Image (cartoon, rainbow, N blue to C red):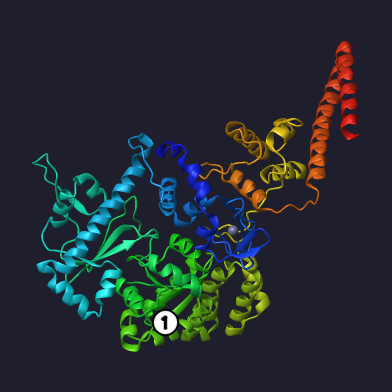
Amino acid sequence: MERGYFSEDLVPRIKQESDILEWVSRYVSLKKTGQNWVGLCPFHSEKTPSFTVSPGKQVYHCFGCGVGGDVISFLMKMDGSTFPETIKVLAERLGISIHQQRGAEADRAEKLREELFQIHRDAADYYHAALLSHPEAQQARDYLRGRGILKETIDAFSLGFAPPGWNGLQQFLTKKGWSPEPIEKAGLIIAKTQPASSRKHYYDRFRERVIFPIFDLQNRVTGFGGRVLDGSLPKYLNSPETPIFSKGRQLYAMDKAREAAGKFGHLVVVEGYFDAIAAHQAGIHSVVATLGTALTADHLERIHRFVQTVKLIFDPDEAGIRAALRTVDLIIPSSVAGEVVLLPNGEDPDSFIKNQGAAAFNRLMSQSMKLLDFAIRQGLADPAARTIEGKLRIVDRILPAIRKVKRAVERSYYVKHLAESLGLDERELTREVAQLGPINIPGALSSSASSLPLLPQEEQILIHLLVHNRVTAPMLLQQIDQDHFTDGRLRQIFNQCVESSRSRGEAVRLDTPIRSERADPQLDSILSALMVKEPDYDDSHQTLKDCIRTLRVKKIRTAMKSLESEIRDAERSGDNPQVKSLLDKLVGLKKISLDVNG
Ligand SMILES: [Zn+2]
């Protein structure tokens, strides 16, 4: 389906001209080792780099979690974008114009997404222009000035204003050529229920509000937040869930925070648009905001692609502390380390930065506390913690969280810490942790997935020789065929290599048979692993000969074994002519096997 979306030679061309090193480097800091580059995997949690990029082969592979593929699959995973979206991004970078053929049934969803992005872009322009020059926007401008938002910040965040009135946006978008249906799907207008009339009527969702466009990592507007200027309710209104917008996944200002977050190794999560904007305006760029929802596992998964640590800011009051404790169950089993920052009483990040300045805010960030340390300290602060019942309550609350800590050494540290803090026996607590049963971490990234499944050694080496151009598919075909491969996945890769060399008439240069749009990620994983793996044999000519011989011997042995069992069957049923003919075959095979071995 997705192939037909673009002209036929586009995808191979884009793969050939794009530089995987350039793209991966935007997200992962890489060091050169031999032919390859390595870094910390953005897809699983690790302390030593096993994420490998081969610029020569234009593939990546993680020997920790097994993910692998080409530049397209990397960007799809990283940005959570679709195949066509990724192709577009890559094409744009290369300056290749793409001709899309629309209308195919399966492309409809893709077309809608594309339209929604464009409608949001147009709407953001409308709101922004309205804020700058609409006669009724004066109070919005005054409001932003009153909150200390500078003109540069208004531009940098493309802040806007939805004028009063019921259909200003709709009229603007209609003039731009949009029909009501996609605008409604974008969540920007709402249908009025008017049973008497068959024609639908609509009104603008956002009216008389300051508008915060929400950008994704490709700098596309995917939704809006709107804040009232007076005391009316709801104070904040967000776009509804649409095919391009999800509150539980997106974070405000992530597009602007990404770079700084990578530099500092952490991301600060605040709760409000103004908190995030104030931080960025003060030069603190590693700050994002949730969109009026609590942090989710999806958020954490996205965050983990850029940083290992997330710092959460809470009010020091009871509600804030409870909110902080609620994140324990979410964050501890995730791949992200959680840290807590408590603001002084009565402050939010916005007011704190304004009153105390950026340096004080940074100082506060540097005093963040590990989430579990914080939870234990909060438990101890409770006067009830002095009684044995109180202590057991704390144990009941905190042990399940400690159990979910991923690293064993960290787990035992916390058991010890908790035991010491409460004056309990450490061994007893350790036993209790064990009694809670095996750890089942829902939603956590599996880091135990082995990189390369156990593959027959010689078959694997043959494919390695093949993808590293030490032998061509036609040369191999003179001595073995696909039946020599006992592993189905390696056989499939072998066949792809054969097919690709046939169709391109290229004997030597093998086109990467990795295909990001393919549904079998395990195949890509094996292939990318073999492609980035540097040879561990010295003499490839001899290795090739040895592997081919082994494969042929193995195949003959298998054939001989099945012949032998057929012979036994024939003997049992007294079928002498059959026994005779099978024996002849067996002798023949034995001769071949001697030849192969010799
Ligand atoms: Zn990995």
| Secondary structure type for disc 1 | strand
Task: Please say whether residue 510 is visible from this viewpoint.
Answer: yes
Kindly tell me whether residue 444 is visible in this rendering: no
Residue shown at 17%/56% (left/top)? 169
At 11% from the left and 39% from the top, the residue drawn is 198
What's the residue type where badge 1 is placed? Leu
- Quadrant of residue 45 within the rendered picture: bottom right
Residue denoted by label 1: 342
Q: Is residue 551 left or right of residue 125?
A: right
**Residue 62, image x and y in percent?**
61, 56
* Residue 133 locus on image (x, y percent): 14, 67
Residue 19 vertical position relative to residue 388 in the rendered view, above or below: above
In the picture shown, does residue 388 fall above or below 493?
A: below
Query: Which part of the image, by quadrant, shows the N terminus?
Result: top left
The front one of 536 and 583 is: 536
Q: From this viewpoint, which residue is outermost toward the top?
A: 577
Q: Is residue 243 left or right of residue 400?
A: left
Q: Is residue 378 left or right of residue 345?
A: right
Where does the C terminus fall, quadrant-wise? top right
| Near-viewer residue (429 or 99) | 99
| Residue 476 horizontal/vertical position (percent) | 73, 35
Q: In terms of image quarters, where does ligand 1 lie?
A: bottom right
Q: Residues within 10 Å of mark 1 (few under 14, many from 20)?
A: many
Q: How far across and down, in percent of the image, does residue 40 sit?
A: 59, 64
The yes-or-no answer for disc 1 within 8 Å of ligand 1 is no
Q: Nearer the viewer, residue 119 or 198?
A: 119
Q: Number of callouts in the render?
A: 1
